Amino acid sequence: MILYKASDTDDIGSLNMSRALGDLQYKDPLINSGTGPLNEAQIRADVSSSIDQWNLLSNEPYLSRVDLNDGSQHVLILTSDGVTNSLEDEIMVHGLLTCYRSGLNATESAKYIVDEAADVPGSDNATCIAVFIGGAS
């Protein structure tokens, strides 16, 4: 990965969001401390000799809590971009609920979603984790 100056904005090339949580080397700001010459990473990133730069990525995830109604059915879907770039959200949810109502478990239902995404021409690697929450209606 190389930081580069495309215009007036520093960009991070080819960095997926999942990297924000795991790659600690991208969280330290590339700054010129003024105590010596720029290092190789700072030169590649076109670091100014007079401006401090902030952290490139946050490793603090955004969290929220949702209270679910008792007795209701809910589905939790975690997918890779290979699924979300191939299928609309409504299609994924409808497909999972249809699988669930036909008696498939969460693993089998997730496999169905991955297979649907893989059938789309030009699709990427696809991953889906499904969790069914709540009882039958």
Image (tube, rainbow, N blue to C red):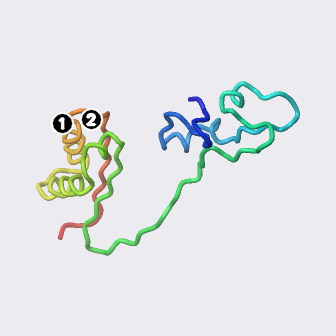
Going by the numbered disc 1, the residue's amino acid type is Asp
Q: Please give the name of the residue rendered at 59% of the width and 53% of the height, measured from the top-left corner.
A: 60
Residue 18: x and y in percent read: 48, 42
Residue 12: x and y in percent read: 56, 37
Kindly state the secondary structure of the residue where label 1 is placed. loop
User: Closer to the camera, 41 or 46?
Assistant: 46
Single out the residue that lies furthest toward the right. Answer: 35
User: Closer to the camera, 51 or 69?
Assistant: 51
Label number found at residue 119: 1
Question: Total number of numbered labels?
Answer: 2
Question: Which of the image's four quarters has the C terminus?
Answer: bottom left
Mark 2 closeness class: few <14, some 14–19, many ≥20 residues within 10 Å? some
- What distance separates the C-alpha of mark 2 from that of mark 1? 7 Å
Q: Are marks 2 and 1 in contact (CB under 8 Å)?
A: yes
Residue 27: x and y in percent read: 65, 42
Asked where in the image residue 73 lies, by quadrant, the reply is bottom left
Question: Which of the image's four quarters has the N terminus?
Answer: top right
Residue 111: x and y in percent read: 23, 42
Asked whether, in this view, residue 107 is left or right of residue 68, the answer is left
Q: Please give the name of the residue rendered at 25% of the width and 52% of the height, measured from the top-left corner.
A: 88
Q: Please give the name of the residue rendered at 46% of the width and 67% of the height, measured from the top-left corner.
A: 65
Going by the numbered disc 2, the residue's amino acid type is Ser
Q: Please give the name of the residue rendered at 71% of the width and 44% of the height, measured from the top-left corner.
A: 53
Kindly state the secondary structure of the residue where label 2 is placed. loop
Asked whether, in this view, residue 133 is left or right of residue 51, the answer is left
From the viewer's perspective, is residue 20 above or below residue 97? above
Residue indicated by mark 2: 123
Asked where in the image residue 74 lies, by quadrant, the reply is bottom left
